[in-house]
């Protein structure tokens, strides 16, 4: 349970009680070069709505260099996992045979200082990524990592890969580096140190405005809302809303809203059995083609393909 509470701490998810999770498997893999991967798989006994979560942690110790490391932690929610042995890749031939249960996969990557040293430049540089890799930043911090499609794709591939021995070592090494690249890219985009401590939102009132904006977006999944309208509702300007929302939640207003809409669309299609036309109308799309394009961009498949699973 320690790993689950650790990665969920500081998020907007409700803490999970110890009796809600059952540890099904855990493993530790030493990836050549020094990276360590820990994997946990849990069964969630009390199903609930949860977002996938990613966190980057910068561990700095002033004297003990062995304690310096960058961690990437990911919590992936699989609400449609089927435990039926006949089920192939999460899709049963007959929905009557489905034995659905909610699972959580936790993946924790450790990148120690001696591993990261090979990527650092020998010359002085003001680059944020160089400073982090060389551990020139003197203060530890943690920040959310945006789980875009490419990051989620890598995590899914790591969980499902069938490589073994040398090929597995090569594969995991390449994927671990790609995850580190994308994680650092999220930080490089925010060049100010304010992104680490959320100093951009200096008081509770500003933070509450961002929380209110998030709640309004969740309530308006079927009624598209513009940034201009949203900023007026929470009492701030558009620029401050966009910067504050990303500083607090680690994602843009648009990406958050679109991800939530597509997750809801997937639920309506697969769980409720609604038609593509019905879901498109419920989400406020002007045409089925626009909805299909957005859905495929988010999930990688067309909505009609999901109905066939």
Image (tube, helix red, strand yellow):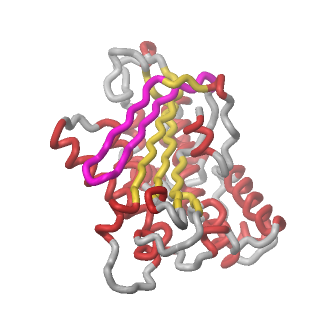
Q: Residue at x 55, y 38 (%)?
A: 3
Q: Nearer the viewer, residue 293 or 42?
A: 42
- The residue lying at 37 percent from left, 56 percent from top is 179
Percent x, y for residue 308? 37, 31
**Residue 45 placement: quadrant:** top right
Counting from the top left corner in percent of width and height, residue 123 is at 34, 85
Q: Is 82 rendered above or below residue 143?
A: above
Looking at the image, the residue that sits furthest to the left is 166
Q: Nearer the viewer, residue 160 or 4?
A: 4
Does residue 69 appear in the picture of this structure?
yes
Residue at 74% x, 58% y: name it: 211
Judged left or right of residue 228, residue 169 is left
Residue 66 percent coordinates (x, y):
44, 57
* Tally of marks: 0
Q: Is residue 292 visible?
A: no
Instruction: Give yes or no for residue 2 being in the magenta stretch.
Output: no
* Residue at 54% over, 75% down: 190
Give the quarter of the figure containing the N terminus: top right
Dominant secondary structure of the magenta stretch? strand
Q: Is residue 69 left or right of residue 161?
A: right
Instruction: Give the quadrant of the C terminus.
Output: top left
Q: Nearer the viewer, residue 258 or 197?
A: 197
Q: Position of residue 79 (x, y in %)?
A: 52, 31
The magenta stretch spans which residues?
24-46
On whether residue 31 falls in the magenta region, the answer is yes
Q: Relative to residue 230, is residue 2 depicted above or below? A: above
Name the residue furthest front.
63
User: On the rendered structure, is 26 left or right of 139?
Assistant: left
């Amino acid at each position: 349970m320690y790993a689950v509470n650790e990665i969920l701490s500081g998020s907007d998810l409700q803490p999970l009680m110890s009796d809600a999770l059952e540890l099904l498997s855990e493993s530790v893999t030493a990836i050549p070069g020094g990276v360590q991967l820990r994997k946990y798989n849990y069964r969630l006994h009390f199903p609930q709505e949860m977002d996938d979560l990613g966190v980057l942690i910068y561990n700095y110790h002033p004297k003990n260099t062995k304690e310096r490391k960058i961690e990437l932690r990911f919590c992936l929610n699989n609400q449609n996992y089927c435990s039926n042995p006949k089920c192939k890749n999460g899709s049963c031939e007959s929905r009557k045979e489905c034995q659905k249960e909610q699972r959580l996969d936790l993946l924790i990557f450790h990148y120690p200082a001696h591993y990261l040293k090979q990527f650092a430049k020998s010359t002085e540089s003001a680059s944020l990524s160089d400073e982090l890799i060389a551990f020139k930043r003197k203060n530890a911090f943690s920040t959310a990592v945006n789980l875009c499609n490419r990051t989620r794709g890598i995590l899914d591939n790591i969980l499902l890969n069938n490589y073994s021995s040398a090929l597995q070592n090569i594969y995991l090494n390449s994927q671990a580096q790609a995850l580190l690249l994308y994680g650092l890219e999220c930080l490089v985009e925010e060049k100010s140190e304010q992104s680490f401590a959320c100093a951009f939102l200096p008081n509770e009132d500003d933070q509450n405005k961002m929380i209110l904006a998030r709640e309004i977006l969740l309530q308006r999944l079927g009624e598209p809302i513009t940034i201009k309208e949203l900023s007026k509702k929470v009492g701030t300007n558009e620029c401050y809303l966009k910067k504050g929302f990303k500083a607090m939640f680690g994602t843009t207003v648009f990406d958050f809203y679109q991800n939530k809409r597509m997750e809801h669309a997937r639920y309506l299609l697969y769980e409720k059995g609604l038609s593509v036309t019905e879901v498109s109308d419920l989400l406020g799309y002007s045409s089925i083609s626009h909805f299909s394009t957005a859905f495929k961009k988010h999930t990688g498949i067309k909505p009609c393909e999901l109905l066939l699973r």
